[in-house]
Structures are given as C-alpha cells and as structure tokens.
Image (tube, helix red, strand yellow):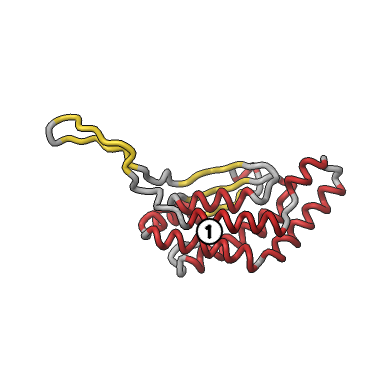
Amino acid sequence: MDARTEARKLQALPYKSRQDILNAVADALVERKEELLVANAIDLEAAEEDGIDLVLKNRLKLTEEKIATLVAGLRKLAGLPDPLGVVKSKRDLADGLELSLITVPIGVLMIIFESRPDSMPQIAALSLASGNGLLLKGGKEAVNSNTAIHKVIGDAVESGSGGKIKRDIIGLVTSRGQV
C-alpha cells in the first residue's frame, strides 16, 4: 500500500517539513484555483442536467471565497504546534516504571465524504499535519472537482517535501470496487 509507505516516510520527517508541505498545498490552491473552478463547473453542469437538489448543488459548488477560506485554514494549521509526540498524561505504575499517553500517527486513514469538494483539502491537511496517509472517497457528483483537487494536492505534497514524499500518500478512491 503506497499510502502506508509514504506515511512512514512523512512520520520520520521533522515537523517543519510537514508545515512546509501544508504551506505548499495552500500555495497550490491559490495558484491553481482557476483549474479547480473549471473542473467544478463541469460537475455543477452535470448536477444541473441530472436534476440534483439545490442544497446538494450548493454543497458541491466551489467558489473563490471557499478556496480562500481553505487556504487560510491550511496556513493556520501549519502554524500550530506539532500534534505528534505530545504527552497527554503520565502515571507511575511502580518504582522506575512509568506509563505515558503520547500522541502518535494512526497510519492510514480512509475517509468517505459526500459531494463537498472543499472537504478534501481540509481532510488532507489534517492527515498530513498528523503524519498519516489517507485514502479518500468523495461523492460521484464531484468526480471532476475531486480529481482536480487531488492532483493539485499531490503535486504540492511532492514539491513541498522536496520530493521526499510522493503524491501516493493521499489516494483517491473513485469506485466502490477500489474500497
């Protein structure tokens, strides 16, 4: 599993590297927003043709404002302290034996989300910040948007890590058969 291999590499990097990756993703969302909006327009047109409910279409729609909010959230997350290695509690069990609860990565997460393409960068950012690999399955109504966002994030992960982490750390599942 490629996501697992890449997650192990990510976990071995210093937190500064994970912060650089998050900032690279934020930069890429800004630089390539037109590409994302074009892909989203294709999904919105298909939703219109399919008679999708207005509420779902509103969730599906990406806007410049939503992208700006995503970018601000990514930058804020990148500025937070390292979530890994935090000692949550300690307890002496016996003389010289201490039990500690310390935050660590899970490994690879699988997240299934509805047709909200703006969810993908948020979920990916949390996964990257915490040193985890990720498999994502979005709603079929957002297939073009999700594919475009996945590509932008993958490119940013590779460039932001200086090639140390491959795009495979985040996999996009496009069919139930892949799950």
Q: How many labels does the image show?
A: 1
The one nearer the camera, 19 or 161, is 19
Q: In the rendering, at what x and y percent does residue 116 appear?
A: 68, 46
Classify mark 1: helix, strand or loop: helix
Q: In which quarter of the image is residue 42?
A: bottom right
For this view, does 147 lie left or right of residue 127? right
The one nearer the camera, 165 or 14, is 14
Amino acid under disc 1:
Arg
* Residue under the image location 57 percent in, 61 percent down: 26
Which residue sits furthest left?
A: 95
Residue 40, can we see it?
yes
- Name the residue carrying label 1: 75
For this view, does 93 lie left or right of residue 147? left
Q: In the rendering, at what x and y percent does residue 102 appear?
A: 33, 41
Residue 1, can we see it?
no
Q: In the rendering, at what x and y percent does residue 113 appear?
A: 63, 42
Quarter the C terminus occupies: top right
Q: In the rendering, at what x and y percent does residue 77 appear?
A: 50, 53
Q: In which quarter of the image is residue 65?
A: bottom right
For this view, does 58 lie left or right of residue 82? right
* Residue under the image location 72 percent in, 65 percent down: 34
The one nearer the camera, 176 or 55, is 55
Q: In which quarter of the image is residue 104?
A: top left
The one nearer the camera, 122 or 81, is 81
For this view, does 55 lie left or right of residue 36? right
Q: Is disc 1 surrounded by few (<14), some (14 to 19) or many (20+) residues within 10 Å?
A: many
